[in-house]
Image (spheres, helix red, strand yellow):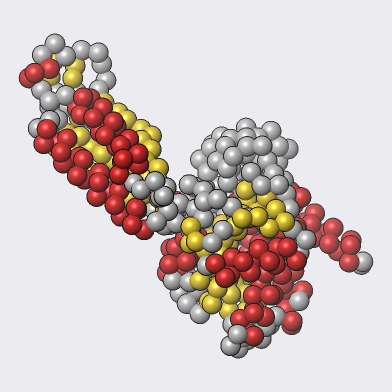
Amino acid sequence: MSQTSETQLLEQQLIAFRHDLHRHPELSFEEVETTKKIKAALEEKKIKILNLPLKTGVVAEVSGKEDGPVIALRSDIDALPIHEQSGVAFTSENDGVMHACGHDFHTSTLLGTAYLLKDHEDELQGTVRLIFQPGEESGHGAESVVKTGVLDDVKVIFGLHNDPTLKVGEIGSRHHALTAGVDRFEIHINAKGAHAARPYEGKDPIVILAQVINVFQSIVSRNIASTENAVVSITQVHAGNTWNVIPASAFVEGTVRTFSKDVRAYIPERFRTILNGIAETFESEIELKWFPGPPSVENDPEWTDFALDVAGKEGLTPKLLEPTSIGEDFAFYQESLIGAFVMVGSGGPYALHHPKFRADDHAIYPTSRYFESLAIEALKKLTASV
Ligand SMILES: [Zn+2]
Ligand SMILES: [Zn+2]
């Protein structure tokens, strides 16, 4: 078979694989069928699958020189609890669940890379571990992979995410913070209910809730240096259930997005100071619950430049990006490993997590090729620097 028709065949196979995943999306840590499909596709090509204590997700390996360096490539495989409205022919058949972040695109891309690397196995200067990570949307999938120890000997890790704001063929990244640190908070206000006509006999949690919302808006505008970035968003409030009763309690939930470690540590501290002051003023109890998610993706400058250079050599268009306030649990890998994360143009009109989100299939095969070259070149670079 000619090179061109082989290429076309692989491209079609990867697109079909993606469409199948898209039709049958599964939520974080429930990716049982997805995992089976990935394993079957790897086995078809006789690619080694590592035996790890993971309920879902797969780590595979392609090895050339066994005593050479080890690098890792990572994609994620889970979907979101969103009802799909994209109108694509391969729309989700699992009602209320959708690949609205394009992790189906990432999975087929990495499968393509695995296939391409397997074809050139003998030329590899070391080992490439291919991580099909579960549970990214939960914020804890990367941790589950790290815990298995499968990355202990890895020298450098690369990850990718599709980006509908970039055109197909564009590869974007930046030095240091690319995505935001993501934290979630809950505030439980325990005050004192009363008849709506006699508020002085109670401690109105709705008035307290209003203070919390207002004062929180001063944190980014008045406490964070203008050279730093942060977001404080309150996304859910609940209090009361009728018109003539002052309730006894109120609930507030939201998220904080930060880029530097210092700002990330400062905001919950500031929350506590504000909440203690409001609680004292209104003679009530306010409890803060803090749920830390992934930190900021912190790209190694040297390997980021390297990843962008390889993109250029592959005929793709490298782009320097501004930081984005979305979260990405790839950051957990970078707590112990050197790594670079890139955004791959998927050229759609709708944002990630939108019910009409679409990713362009034309970007899959070139991205598989790109990650293949990145792996080959990274192993060469590591071998040369020993
Ligand atoms: Zn997502
Ligand atoms: Zn995602």
Q: Which residue is drawn at 56% across and 58% down?
A: 174
**Along the viewing direction, whichever of 39 and 252 lies nearer the viewer:** 252
**How far from the left and from the top, in percent, is residue 161?**
60, 54
Q: 61 above or below 219?
A: below
**Along the viewing direction, whichever of 298 and 54 lies nearer the viewer:** 298
**Along the viewing direction, whichever of 31 and 339 lies nearer the viewer:** 339
Q: Which residue is drawn at 73% across and 53% down?
A: 169
Q: In which quarter of the image is the C terminus?
A: bottom right
Q: Which residue lies furthest to the front in this view?
A: 226
Question: On the image, which quarter does residue 304 sit in?
Answer: bottom right
**How far from the left and from the top, in percent, is residue 189?**
20, 34
**How far from the left and from the top, in percent, is residue 228?**
40, 50
Question: On the image, which quarter does residue 247 sit in?
Answer: top left
Q: Which residue lies furthest to the left in this view?
A: 201
**How far from the left and from the top, in percent, is residue 94?**
59, 40
Q: Residue at x 17, y 35 (%)?
A: 278
Q: Is residue 152 visible?
A: yes
Q: In which quarter of the image is the N terminus?
A: bottom right
Q: Can residue 43 be seen in this view?
A: no
Q: Which residue is drawn at 10% across and 22% down?
A: 202
Q: Is residue 19 toward the left or the right of residue 200 in the image?
A: right
Q: Is residue 93 toward the left or the right of residue 215 in the image?
A: right
